[in-house]
Amino acid sequence: MRRLSVLSGPLLGYVILAILGTLFAQDRELVPERDWTSVDGKVMRASLIGFEKGQGQFRTPEGRRFVIPDERLSYRDQVEVFAARLRSEYEVSYSADINTDFYYSKHIPASRRSEKKYSYIGFGPGRFNLAIALIEPGVDLGRHKEIVLRGREGGKDVVYPVRETDIRRFTRNGSEQVFIRLSFVPGQNEDLLESIEGALAASSLTFVARGGNLEERVLAFDETECNGLREMLQAYRHASILIREGFLKRDRLVDQAIDAAGKSVPNGSDGDPLEPFRKNLSQRKYGTLQWKEQLVDGIGFLGADVVVRQSDGEIVKIPFGEIEGEGRRRLFEKRLEEAYGKSRYESSAGVAVFFHPDWDSQRMNYSRSILLTLNQKGEYLLRLFAWTGSFGGASVKEIFVRGDAQEKPFPVECRRDDSHSRERTDGTRNTLVGCYLDVKGSEAAMELLGSKSIQFRIRSDQNQDVSVTLQEEERDITLESVALYWWSRQL
């Protein structure tokens, strides 16, 4: 029988296309050709084409390939490599509700996340965090009081108290699954991470859910779960450094912008707060405003102040009350729309409560924050919301509010009908409270502006105390509400 030793015709064309396709795939460009700078100042021209053993793989215009560890590049260039790695090596899920991207390791596909323990990092407006989801199908882990990282033989257990915000729910096949999400934020609660990394290094990562008079649940990570968490921890640690150094912001990666000097100003930066506005020289977002007999361009807000550009190009902040005429009303309505969008709840009494766009209508009832309200008379007022499970459903008598920009906390008195008791799925009770700030309290709330941390000390009618620090989004919406309240008094 005759053998064909030479390919010809259409078959040959398909083979050539297949070979070219393979070569093209290998030569993909994750970052187009550009200049890259090393930590010692050397500059090279290359494109980023992939990753090899966790290191960026580059190709020069002449076709030479080489790898460079991230730490050998400047911080500015590390941002490019970091973003490219997440785009190409991780699975991403975008949440339109909160305008946030969540990145997952591909070791655990989305179809298995209801059965496997998994981790992810999130990038959104004003947010960046690492989360570890502990799940056991068919088991309600939310009824346990604490999560314990079981130490290696001779090692010490590390305890992580379960907070209400750690409990998550989803519905699958008509039944509710309750799991625990351990969340970590840079500079706040990372103590457990070092122990987790040590356990991963020894391939012995095991958590135990216990407390609540329930049987302990042992949650051991298998090989794929460990590999996925290793990846996420590496990405989280790298991003934390870039955020700390000011080269990466707490925002979606697609919205990141690096200036010509290579450094962006992250949220909460201790640098010049007007610097981000100076970089947007063409911005004229809020139109022309009249201020002290001169026309200025409105370009943003800082606390209770308005940021404007003068005719000579200088960027300054000015008190809202110094804006003349209808400009004040226009600014107020624009800021109100930007802060809340359509996120408001109309009560049966005709009171509108404005809440964070990232929260659903239920989240409002459980958040600790000071929110802006509008009554039927057209008056804007401030209302404090808080909750705690420490009082067993007992009423709240008083809440002390303290920001780091204040000299001392200010008290908010609560009436008995401001408190409501709500039963949880585990049989315990939460106390929910919503009370209006009086004129004195509202004026004291102005002192919160500029605070990077806000704390509520909640006191029951039995003189029990519990202190809580507002989460980042709760703090931000509190400060926005206070600023807008102050503006409303000057319309």
Image (cartoon, helix red, strand yellow):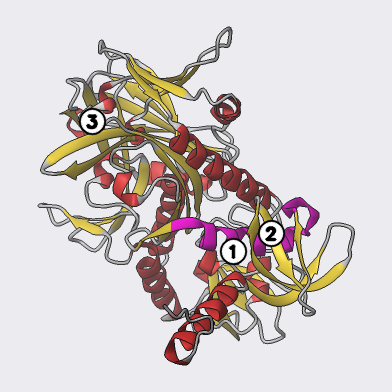
Residue at image location 65% in from the left, 50% down from the top: 53
Going by the numbered disc 3, the residue's amino acid type is Arg
Describe the element under mark 3 as helix, strand or loop.
loop
User: Left or right: 182 with respect to 192?
Assistant: left
Main SS, magenta region, reads helix
Q: Nearer the viewer, residue 187 or 470?
A: 187
Which residue does the numbered mark 2 point to in the structure image?
56
For residue 415, which numbered disc appears in the image? 3
10 Å crowding of disc 2: few (<14), some (14-19), many (20+) = many
Rendering coords of residue 95 (x, y %): 35, 59
Going by the numbered disc 2, the residue's amino acid type is Gly
Whether the residues at callouts 1 and 2 have beta carbons within 8 Å, the answer is yes
Rendering coords of residue 232 (x, y %): 53, 44
Q: Is residue 288 visible?
A: no
User: Left or right: 353 with respect to 327?
Assistant: left
Residue 466 higher or lower than 339, as above or below:
above
Stretch of the chain drawn in magenta: 69-91
Residue 123 included in the magenta stretch of the image: no
